[in-house]
């Protein structure tokens, strides 16, 4: 059973930083990609950032230059460093991993940015 365990959410003032972590319980070579999504009330879940097994990264336009995704293969962990946070970044952030032929989601972690 593949599990994704997220941590690092919380409350921060605008302009501040947070780092999210997501540990994936799977064999490293079986992980195709790891991504971060976010979702607010009544909104669709949207892709924030993604990193492939070859370390190719991609970002939503709204976070380019402020967020950085990275991974530690030794720990099977993906990180999302979020800088210059804005109130509109307030959402529940979800980790997603492609493992083998399936995709898996984490339970979500709340990020709240106060103005």
Image: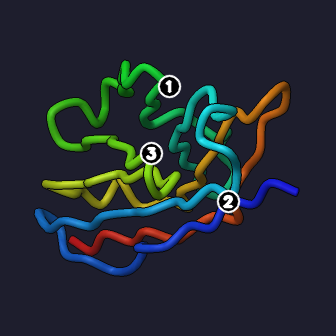
Identified at 59% across, 51% down, the residue is: 95
Residue in the image at 17% along x and 55% along y: 83
Residue 23 falls in which quadrant of the image?
bottom right
Q: Is residue 25 left or right of residue 56?
A: right
Quadrant assignment for the N terminus: bottom right
* Element at label 1: loop
Q: Which residue is mark 2?
A: 4
Residue 19 rendering spot, x and y as whole percentages = 30, 64
Q: Residues within 10 Å of mark 2 (few under 14, many from 20)?
A: many
Which percent across, then down, holds residue 30? 69, 32
Q: Nearer the viewer, residue 68 or 113?
A: 68
Q: Is residue 62 above or below residue 110?
A: above
Question: Which quadrant would the C terminus be assigned to in this image?
Answer: bottom left
For disc 3, the marked residue is 73
User: Eyeballing the image, is 114 above or below 38?
Assistant: below
Where residue 4 appears, x then y in whole percent? 67, 59
Q: Is residue 24 above or below residue 68?
A: below
Q: Which mark is residue 53?
A: 1
* Proximity of marks 3 and 2: CB atoms separated by less than 8 Å: no
Work out how far the residue at label 3 is from the one at label 2, CA to CA, in angstroms. Answer: 14 Å
Q: Residue at x 48, y 54 (%)?
A: 77
Q: Secondary structure at mark 3?
A: loop
Count of numbered labels shown in the rendering: 3
Label 3 near label 1: C-beta < 8 Å? no
Disc 3 residue crowd, few under 14, some 14–19, many 20+, Cα 10 Å? some
First of labels 2, 1 by sequence position? 2
Of the residues tagged 3 and 2, which is closer to the observer?
3
């Amino acid at each position: 059973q593949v599990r994704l365990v997220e941590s690092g959410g919380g409350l921060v003032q605008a302009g501040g930083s947070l780092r999210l972590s997501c540990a994936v319980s799977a064999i490293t070579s079986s992980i195709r990609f790891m991504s971060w999504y976010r979702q607010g009330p009544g909104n669709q879940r949207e892709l924030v950032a993604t990193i492939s097994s070859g370390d190719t990264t991609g970002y939503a336009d709204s976070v380019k230059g402020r967020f950085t995704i990275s991974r530690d293969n030794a720990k099977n962990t993906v990180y999302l460093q979020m800088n210059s946070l804005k109130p509109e970044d307030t959402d529940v952030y979800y980790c997603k991993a492609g493992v083998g032929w399936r995709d898996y989601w984490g339970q979500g972690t709340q990020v709240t940015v106060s103005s």
